[in-house]
Amino acid sequence: MGETPDLKISEDRSAVLWYSAERNAADKSAKSVDPKNTAVATISIDVLLFGLLSAITTESPISLSLPDMATPMDVVAALEDRFGADSFAQIKDPSVGILPCCRLFVDGEPLEDPYAPISSDGAAATVEMIILKGFEGG
Amino acid sequence: MKWGMVIDLKRCVGCYGCQLSCKAEHGTPRGIFFARVLKQEEGQYPTVSQTFLPVLCNHCEDPPCVEACPTGASFIWEDDGTVDIDHDICVGCRTCMLACPYSNRYFNDNEQAYYGDKGQTPFENARTTQHQEGVVMKCNFCRDRRQAGKEPACVANCPTVARHFGDLDDPTSNVSRLIKERAGFVLHPDKGTKPNVYYLPA
Amino acid sequence: MNEIKPPRIVETSPEGDEWIPSTCNLCYGTCSILVHKVDGVAVKIEGNPKSTVGKGRLCGKGVSGLMTHYDPNRVRVPMRRTNPEKGIGIDPGWEEISWDEALDEIAGRLKKIRADDPRKLSIQRTTTVYTMGLPWAAFAPGFGTTNVSEGGGGLHCGNSAHQVSGLLHASWGVLPDFQYCNYTLYFGASKGHAAGHNSNSNMAQAADARERGMKMVVVDPMCNFAAAKANEWVPIRVGTDAALALAMCNVLANELGTLDEPYLKAKTNGPYLIGPDGTYVRDVESNEPLVWDSKAGSAKPHNVADSEDMALEGEFDVDGVICQPAFALLKEHLKKYSPEYAEEITTVPVENIRRISEEFAREARIGSTIVIDGITLPYRPAAAIAFRGLQGHRNATFNFLAVLLLNQLVGAADVVGSCHGFNSSFDGIPETGRMGYKPKAGPDGLMEVGTWMAYDPPYPRPEPKKPEEMGLQDLFVMGMTSPFFNSEEGEELWEKFDMPYRPEMLINYGANIMMSIANKDLIAESLKKLDFIASFDLFMNETSDFVDIILPDRGYLGCYNTRPNTPYIFSHPAGMGDWSWAIQQPVVEPEGEERIFADVLIDLADRADFLSDINAAFNAVFDLRGEYRLQSDRKYSYEEVCDADLKNNFGPERGLEFFKKEGVVTWPKTPEEVYWRPFTDARVPIYWEWMPDLGKKIQAISGSAGLDVPMEYYSALVEYLPCVSHKCDHDGFDFYTFYYRDTLHTNSFTMENAWLDEAAQLDPYSYNIAMNTASGLNREIEDGDMIWLETERGRKVKGRVHLTQAIHPEGLGIAALCGHWAKGMPVAKGKGIFYNELLELDWDYVNPVNLTLDLCSKVKVTRAEES
């Protein structure tokens, strides 16, 4: 190999741009709210299961009574208690809680964060759950 | 006024958009392509290059086909310099095809339906039947589209914007400018036909 | 001068003369079109200049769509087989039946399966009309099956391209930023040269870039398409691209030292500390990966330390654990990929490897910035990209990663002029803000995509499980597509894994899996085992021999689709310019009894009693809100669903009627959308920390079933690993075959289009085997000879040779998936070469990470008789 050409830069003007979106550590608080510690009241949640999940039970809606800060994770835990953990194994994952292929809608609005409270004001809610999977390729 | 075309070989990627949009515009029968793409290989492995060369009627200023035509069916439009064929006069003798050094004339004697004995499709019925059989056909720079104020189909459609169309008599036109600035050339200049289709080097 | 009659093509009756906006679907590029109709007959298809998707221009395929639409060989009525015996070439004895009969029978079977185990239904779709998949995205989950596959996951899927582009660029694929790039390296890709995602717009952008002076270097065994337009063609031994790319990375990192350190510190996991076990050293409290804060002289969580202070190199002691930043490990690892080693593997001369690396490093202009629309952005006008060619090998995942690593080292990722994950960030529809998405930081600070083709994103991946999906993607969790979906090989694997069910029924939508995967005999065996197959088709093709009921589809000119171009990561122009939202609508009446497949699916859901589920699925798929949500028990037409989708996104004034008339809505992009990388705090993985652990977890499940996962594919550090073909050294087997996408053809479908077939017959390559001239003459093979190609395992295919200087001496290039034998496709029948006949369909030939099938083979060439 011949002499190494000097390709080094003299001034790095872009560095500041790379650092500009730095995550603010203060923004990163724990997502999970432990209902056992904060909840005093309970709320009624009606759960509607569709598609593959609907095979779990003929009961519809499934009426649950949960602490008022209950999250989708708590709903799934309550469903597991009733119908067995196996039925929900395919939507759960240790790192993200509920896999994104399981779509949850609370009163018709999508809820992306499995650790966010379902009802912020203690009102009853209807939760729809369906697994969307199976796109690939292209 | 003299219509001319400039094809930029640097931009062309050989996608066949011209060849097939021409067919779609005119509904020509099997075997007839007013516009085509040729692929040329030059050099030896590994220093080889591939050139995509789109071709069509060159609308020559001194067209040997017109000269050769015994009936006067092949002619030059005086108002715009394009070479055309009057199919009512053409007797299908094919002398012009032998005279054209570019092989861009076609004799319409193939089946008028692509799907053979299944008959003509509604598209073919609407389009292909407009062509007379037993005559010589070729590109006329999309005369119908021009009359409707549109560019020729191959120009308007080219996905790489490699084709330009304009007045070669006007030194300020896009085509005149491109030929001058980018050293436009014609095919087989040695034949003395003075083509009005120019190419820009790859 | 002669008198000549007025126009010979007469546009009759102006009232019967209309131009209808819609979307092309001769491939999944989905360019916006206008269809000219005169007195009810479609007479011309042109590009729609109002749309940025295609920019008013179409490729040869797009302008030929009417030949497919009016093909008299199209299936026009529902048909049922009368011969129970299924097999290749065995006449099914088709009889015409009514739609009611057909749907009642299918619905009856659906009902039974759904009550038993809905996963016993599998669904197969073609990639050709991939973006028409939304009704399927509702039908399958509404029914309750997760077994949905694209064209069998064979030759045409960019499995690794999507996976790795998703991980590093939050997009389905990558492109150079044609508007500003000055130097681009292509590895096995033809982006901008008439194929693939966003085909037409890319062609114009690439041509602009060439004219502007962008230098293009194309690494490819064959000098066609992209390489033909390149400044330099780098011929390479088939399937060895990763060795070349890693040698180039080595030159950048260890010889030239041209690295964008601030980028590596802020935007990659390069600073994350790796312990002796190869995994992240984590913060005890937060469990976040640690970095070494050089300023503080201590380890801190990555989300606490300032990136600027993070060490990229060095050895550190964190509470007694000796660790190094991931980048340091990568840099050291790259040393084994010397240019000298790479030359031996790839046949690319050492001096070329060093020169191209230097050119790439210089052109990346590390440290520079540029102002676009008043915003200062990093400027890196160099891009290394790849696509299907490079990733169709057993080392698929690493092959793709190796190339994209080049961009990471010099900070050329999603900034001006660089490698782009196209349209990874979208601010949403201006009037409503809906549909917007941005890449964001996920677990361990690594990037999650803002949007994906479905809710199954490339990161984070779920934990591997004992497989219950037919394609085994729940075990091989990095995979998106699987060749084992419908194959006898799959059956063997299902047995090994003690799969709790077997597929009993297949609904197929346009896929011709007998041709699109590999070894057709294994596919045939698996199809025979199914109780029932219903198939939506345009033609009776090779797969139809196994189908029970054929349903005539209206095709792309007869259907509705509200989202042919979204999500924008799939097939929408990249770079600055406009966003366009177009629709697809029926522009022609059916010629027979063809129906809109989406309405048929809704009809089936109704007849099989899962209407409320498909409605819930539509609500979820389209994210319908408020008044636009579908009511549980009502049966909608797909037209109504489309209207709801459009109003839900664009407001009440712009529903289906508006879009049917206007065709497309367009508005400008912003620099923050296009050049999004500086604006995200997400990092991307240049060290795949999770891989060895994932590999062990998969092996723990698969090993006990007797399927061994080679762990080298689950390395945290990218490797070159050879294909099976590279290990074949038997006498006489001296050519590597490879497949490429032809500009004239899409998958195995367009050979039946009479215009495209005719053009392909005139093309020197489309239907022939490309062989290096000298290699041919050395074996006394002449241009035009018929030859046999035969693999070590005895798989054979015959074809005509085209001798060319434009191919690597060891390579044999074959275009598309030709060689049809079905009599229902008489134009296509017997044309070209059936490449897949050479391919094995078994575990040794798939990428053990994501199940991409290896598409190269080592063959012996012998002369064949003329037939």
Image (cartoon, coloured by chain):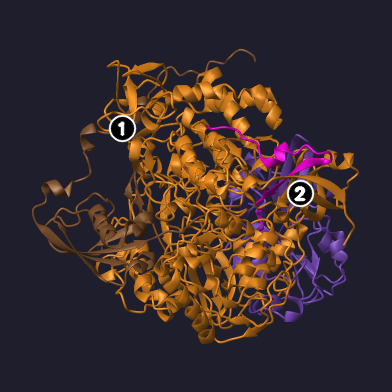
Chain colours: A brown, B purple, C orange
Q: Chain of mark 2?
A: C
Compare residues B86 and C812 and report the one nearer the observer. Answer: C812
Q: Name which residue type carries label 1.
A: Glu
Q: Nearer the viewer, mark 2 or mark 1?
A: 2
Q: Give the percent coordinates (x, y) of residue C2.
A: 75, 72
Element carrying mark 2 = loop
Q: Quadrant of residue B147?
A: bottom right
Q: Which residues are magenta?
A: C718-747
* Any part of residue A122 in sight: no
Cα distance in 3D space between marks 2 and 1: 50 Å
Q: Which residue is mark 1?
A: C288
Please tell me whether the stretch drawn in magenta is mainly helix, strand or loop: loop
Q: Quadrant of residue C280?
A: top left
Q: Which residue is mark 2?
A: C793
**Vertical side of C58 occupied by C381: above or below:** above
Work out which residue is located at the far front of the displayed protein and give it: C704
* Any part of residue C234 in sight: yes
Q: Give the percent coordinates (x, y) of residue B116.
A: 76, 77
Q: Quadrant of residue C234?
A: top right
* Residue found at x 51% / y 32%: C405
Q: Crowdedness of circle 2 by 10 Å Cα count: few (<14), some, many (20+)?
A: few
